[in-house]
Image (cartoon, rainbow, N blue to C red):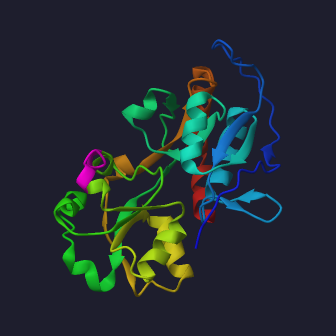
Amino acid sequence: MLFVFLVISPSVSASLSTDAAGTASGIKKNRTLIVGVTPRPVFVNVDNQGNLDGLDIALAKAIFAEAGLSIRFEVYPWKRIVHLLESGDVDVALSASDSDQRREFAYFSSEAFRLGHNLLFTRKEHSSLFDPNERLQQLEGMSVRLGVQRGVSYSYEYDTLLSSAEFQRKLVVVDTPARLVELMLIDRVDAFLGSERDLQTEIDKYGAHDQIVPLFYLMSDKEASSHIMFSKASVPTQWVEKVNQAMRSLKASGRYDEIMKSY
């Protein structure tokens, strides 16, 4: 089955006023920020009319409203969002992993957007083949077909292993979490990497929770903290700090936890 993301611009925008002044050269004042999002079960859902819902959408609306910044969501594949953010054609990305490479073109919120653990999954009967204490490094010496989603950074260890041509040959690259589950069920991959919440949702949809099991986390809680990513080409640092302050305020008030629990 082939999955194709269409680039759409849903008519979803937080109706907020902006009083922040842009100070970077070429950055317009009092404008609507474009937030790039990728459909993901639980986090970003798109209905037939192009309306958006989900945990990431609700968090973003609350955070940017608290910051007094106007936003508009646009839907793209994740890899495309990163490319557009680098050029300044997208201003903001949600739930992004911080990395030295991305810091060349992006700012990151100092506050965690949410905790997002990635795990290694496999078929239940294959679980004894993997040692939870050895992490991903053990795959280098194994004959394994590893399913991964295009453009996703699963952990620092994963990013390091990508420099190995031998490791890259083990990868089966797809565009959606659902496709990872499908490939395992038809024995096209031996294991796959994915978000705890994303993949458990997809596994449940296929009624495969007795067949596919999570084995171990790929990262510590600190590394699992995702952030809001801002384009250096289009977003002034003053706006980044407004968002940081808004996130701290929402967490202190309890509103942040309320949104998290509602999904």
- Residue placed at 20% from the left, 57% from the top? 137
Instruction: From the top left corner, tell me how far across and down residue 147 is, in percent.
Output: 39, 65
> Residue 234 occupies which quadrant of the picture?
top right
Q: Which residues are magenta?
A: 160-166
Query: Is residue 205 depicted above or below 258 in this figure?
Result: below
Q: Nearer the viewer, residue 251 or 232?
A: 232
Q: Nearer the viewer, residue 261 or 189?
A: 189
- Residue placed at 44% from the left, 82% from the top? 185
Is 182 positioned to the left or the right of 88 in the image? left
For the question of whether residue 262 can be seen, the reply is: yes
Q: Is residue 239 magenta?
A: no
Q: Nearer the viewer, residue 151 or 106?
A: 151
Query: Is residue 14 depicted above or below 103 in this figure?
Result: below
Instruction: From the top left corner, tell me how far across and down residue 59 is, in percent.
Output: 63, 50
On the rendered image, what quadrant is the C terminus found in? bottom right
Query: Is residue 143 depicted above or below 25 in this figure?
Result: below
Q: Is residue 163 magenta?
A: yes
For the question of whether residue 244 can be seen, the reply is: no
Instruction: From the top left corner, tell me how far across and down residue 124 is, in percent.
Output: 32, 84
> Residue 230 occupies which quadrant of the picture?
top right
> Residue 31 occupies which quadrant of the picture?
top right
Is 44 positioned to the left or the right of 119 in the image? right
Query: Is residue 212 depicted above or below 40 in this figure?
Result: below
On the rendered image, what quadrant is the N terminus found in? bottom right
- Residue placed at 40% from the left, 33% from the top? 101
- Residue placed at 58% from the left, 63% from the top? 261
Instruction: From the top left corner, tell me how far across and down residue 10 is, in percent.
Output: 79, 51
